């Protein structure tokens, strides 16, 4: 079978569209959690506390990773494959560092007595930040798969679709984190 | 690797202009029937799994109706079957609650969500919009297998020693959050939550695919306004699911934390078995908000596919165009939007601010408008039609009947003042069983009877089908009509035994009558199951491509379509799907969607 397929340029790829709908769905989950948070905040027993310093570093890291991924995608489109591979690897490392920093942040909170069970406002932070981290881990797994494919010398894949999907998803978890951080800072 | 996948996908996706439509790759039994990526096989997997679940869920209702109808009798065979759950042939109270909870969970989620929308969205979307398969056949397959895993977990919860979840299908905390609160709040509740999490993943994967496929994979000429109403209904159903299930997931996650990690999202100031719990600051009402934000759209997730399929079947078998196509689409859209704005009408008596309640009353009653538009259009489609009373048509008409009678009581319950009296009574049970349960079942049956020839290449037996229909519709009214009366008198739901309760003792005879009819109706469903499986192999063979003289694209495929649906090019669409009562060139009374518009016709 030949690989020649005629695709209409104007139409969004079905997988990309699926991803967008999926992103809408993930947003609804966080909307559910954050509105529960807002409802709870207006009731008794709510306490405020400072976010750990590690979260600031992790924010810088994930924004940086978005930039490196953006460079990677650009390189892929220009067929600069060695730069693509390097940038993918850097993005992957930054993604892992983000997860580690989130865990460090949790540890900093925990040692200050801000534990999961102590107060419902602490519990919300752990659940919201934790669920976001799970989504980043999903992205990191995808990055691992794609980096392995990028470094594979036997099979060459020049399809833009997976790269494009990865790009969209990663920027989404990045923006979602920035939003959640703003939310947790402003509404507490 | 990449080359093969691209070529394959090009075929499955029906990329415009592909010429290699018949692709023969080797299929083993496993890839064809078990881990199949063919949307038609996945649809059948959903349907058969749904039928098995429906049998279990229906049987549970018969068993708890035994207790309600014959509270003084004992049934020794129950002890043989259920052991200590029915000690001395009498259903134990814990078991009664487990049965009620599982009946609700199974029928709402596993049968009428997965079994209905999973079956027909999968089966009809690619066939009716002219696509070779779903946007992502792999995700589609995963959707079924997540459902299968959810089913395995839920089934296994029936066999744990402390029994399955038993706090009602709505699993309100604190009962569901505290293992010490009841038998069913122990491991059974954890399994329930895990099963539902898997179920949510399944329905999200399915929903993503349905939306993408409808918006991206339509064949040439199939504009949105030329889509059959079935597709519109499945589309809105998927939108509802994708936006509301994640919110239930967040509620379920918080509940899992409360149960297992000692948090207090939903718990505050609770004493269990004389012990004060340390949990403080939680709110049980918060869970109800999260639950009903899914829970209300969920009833439309169940109902919309039935509406869409009934619209199609009514039009085909009245031999008339559907009345008010755009109004039908508009009312589906209106229902979809309103579905997200009415959840608090389930919470009128939780201490909700009455002024807020007033807004929710208004929004709830607004749903009557699109519902009435739909009913009007169904009736006007039937009006002076050349009606063929096929089994599918009977069930579609039955659907309209049930939707009217069940919908009217919704207007009662939507009023927060009346709800003070009616909430948690049998009136509510009667309302939602008729309008959501039985009506959607009728949509499901209509769909099965109508599209069975396309699914299996054989017909169902008509005699059994007619018996099935008449027993079910008469039975459904005989079961639920008296419950309105009991509910108006104030008889509360979820109670184990009314015979010792002075106020409701007098309903003993009525309860016995209801139980008796429930058993008869259940037996009639067995006829359907026998008919279904027998006819797959032994049914009368379909010999024409278009047995119902319908217009939609699925009837342009071969009688037993392969993976890829059409041999050769996908047909192009030239007209809307409801050109009935219109003379075609060969003297028939319908013109299929793929027939070009003639010179003497106006363009649609």
Image (cartoon, coloured by chain):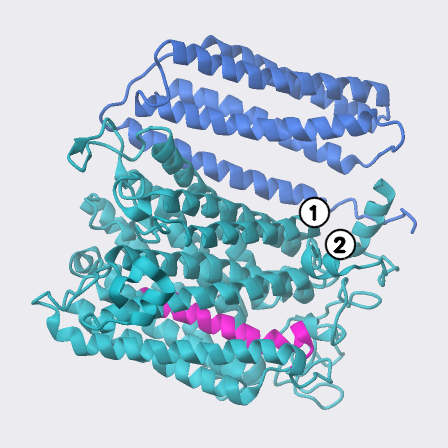
Q: Quick check: B180 above or below B88?
A: above
Q: Are marks 1 and 2 on the same chain?
A: no
Image colour for chain A is blue
Q: Is residue B67 left or right of residue B561?
A: left
Q: Is residue A26 left or right of residue B135?
A: left
Boundaries of the magenta span:
B432-458
Image colour for chain B is cyan
Q: Secondary structure at mark 1?
A: helix
Asked if labels 2 and 1 touch by Cβ distance under 8 angstroms, the answer is yes
Q: Chain of mark 1?
A: A
Q: Chain of mark 2?
A: B
* Residue B428, percent from left and from top: 26, 63
* Residue B404, percent from left and from top: 36, 73
* Residue B348, percent from left and from top: 23, 50
Residue B331 seen in the current view: no
Q: Is residue B237 magenta?
A: no
Residue B13: assigned label: 2
- Is the N terminus of chain B in the top left, top right, bottom left or bottom right quadrant? top right
The residue at which mark 1 appears reads as A14
């Amino acid at each position: 079978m030949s690989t020649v397929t005629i695709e209409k340029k104007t139409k969004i790829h079905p997988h990309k569209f699926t991803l967008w709908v999926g992103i809408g769905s993930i947003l609804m989950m966080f909307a559910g959690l954050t509105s529960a948070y807002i409802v709870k905040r207006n009731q008794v027993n709510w306490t405020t506390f400072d976010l750990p310093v590690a979260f600031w570093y992790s924010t810088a890291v994930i924004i940086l990773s978005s930039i490196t991924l953006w460079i990677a995608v650009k390189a892929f489109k220009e067929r600069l494959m060695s730069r693509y591979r390097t940038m993918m690897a850097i993005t992957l490392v930054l993604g892992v560092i983000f997860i580690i920093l989130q865990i460090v942040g949790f540890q900093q909170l925990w040692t200050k007595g801000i534990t999961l069970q102590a107060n419902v406002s602490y519990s919300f932070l752990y659940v919201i930040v934790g669920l976001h981290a799970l989504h980043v881990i999903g992205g990191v797994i995808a990055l691992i798969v794609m980096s392995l494919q990028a470094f594979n010398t036997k099979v060459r894949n020049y399809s833009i679709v997976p790269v494009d999907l990865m790009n969209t998803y990663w920027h989404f978890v990045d923006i979602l984190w920035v939003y959640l951080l703003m939310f947790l800072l402003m509404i507490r | 690797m990449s080359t093969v996948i691209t070529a394959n996908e090009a075929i499955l996706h029906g990329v415009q202009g592909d010429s290699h439509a018949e692709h023969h790759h080797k299929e083993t039994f496993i890839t064809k029937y078990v881990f199949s990526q063919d949307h038609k096989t996945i649809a059948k997997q959903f349907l058969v799994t749904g039928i098995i679940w429906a049998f279990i869920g229906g049987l549970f209702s018969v068993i708890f109706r035994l207790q309600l109808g014959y509270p003084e009798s004992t049934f020794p065979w129950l002890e043989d079957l259920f052991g200590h759950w029915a000690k001395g042939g009498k259903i134990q109270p814990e078991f009664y609650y487990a049965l009620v909870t599982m009946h609700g969970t199974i029928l709402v989620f596993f049968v009428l969500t997965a079994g209905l929308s999973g079956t027909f969205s999968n089966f009809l979307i690619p066939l009716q919009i002219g696509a070779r398969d779903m946007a992502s056949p792999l995700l589609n397959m995963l959707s079924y297998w997540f459902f299968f895993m959810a089913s395995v977990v839920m089934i296994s919860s029936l066999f744990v020693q402390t029994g399955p979840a038993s706090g009602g299908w709505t699993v309100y905390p604190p009962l569901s959050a505290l293992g010490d609160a009841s038998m069913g709040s122990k491991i059974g509740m954890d399994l329930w939550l895990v099963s539902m999490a898997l179920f949510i993943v399944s329905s999200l994967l399915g929903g993503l695919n349905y939306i993408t496929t409808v918006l991206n994979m339509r064949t040439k000429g199939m504009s949105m306004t030329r889509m059959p109403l079935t597709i519109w209904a499945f589309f809105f159903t998927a939108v509802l699911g994708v936006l509301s299930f994640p919110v239930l997931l967040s509620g379920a996650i918080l509940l899992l934390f409360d149960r297992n990690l000692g948090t207090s999202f939903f718990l505050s100031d609770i004493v269990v078995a004389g012990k004060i719990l340390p949990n403080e600051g939680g709110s049980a009402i918060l869970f109800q908000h999260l639950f009903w934000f899914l829970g209300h759209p969920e009833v439309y997730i169940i109902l919309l596919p039935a509406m869409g399929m009934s619209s199609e079947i009514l039009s085909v078998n009245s031999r008339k165009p559907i009345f008010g196509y755009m109004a039908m689409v508009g009312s589906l859209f209106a229902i979809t939007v309103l579905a997200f704005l009415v959840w608090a009408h389930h919470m009128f008596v939780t201490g909700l601010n009455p002024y807020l309640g007033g807004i929710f009353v208004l929004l709830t009653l607004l749903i009557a408008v699109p519902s009435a538009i739909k009913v009007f259009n169904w009736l006007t489609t039937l009006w002076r039609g050349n009606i063929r009373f096929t089994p599918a048509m009977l069930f579609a008409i039955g659907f309209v009947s049930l939707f009217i009678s069940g919908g009217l009581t919704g207007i009662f319950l939507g009023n927060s003042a009346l709800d003070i009296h009616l909430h948690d009574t049998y009136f509510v049970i009667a309302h939602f069983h008729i309008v959501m349960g039985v009506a959607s079942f009728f949509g499901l049956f209509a769909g099965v009877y109508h599209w069975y020839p396309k699914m299996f290449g054989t017909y169902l037996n008509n005699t059994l089908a007619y018996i099935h229909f008449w027993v079910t519709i008469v039975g459904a009214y005989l079961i639920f009509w008296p419950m309105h009366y009991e509910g108006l008198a104030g008889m509360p739901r979820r109670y184990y035994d009314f015979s010792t309760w002075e106020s409701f003792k007098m309903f003993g005879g009525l309860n016995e009558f209801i139980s008796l009819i429930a058993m008869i109706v259940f037996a009639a469903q067995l006829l359907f199951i026998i008919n279904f499986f027998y006819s797959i192999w032994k049914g009368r063979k379909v010999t024409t491509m278009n047995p119902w003289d319908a217009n939609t694209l699925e009837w342009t495929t071969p009688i037993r379509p392969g993976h890829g649906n059409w041999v050769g090019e996908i047909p192009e669409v030239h007209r809307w799907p409801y050109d009935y009562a219109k003379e075609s060139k060969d003297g028939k009374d319908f013109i299929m969607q793929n027939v070009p518009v003639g010179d003497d016709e106006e363009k649609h």
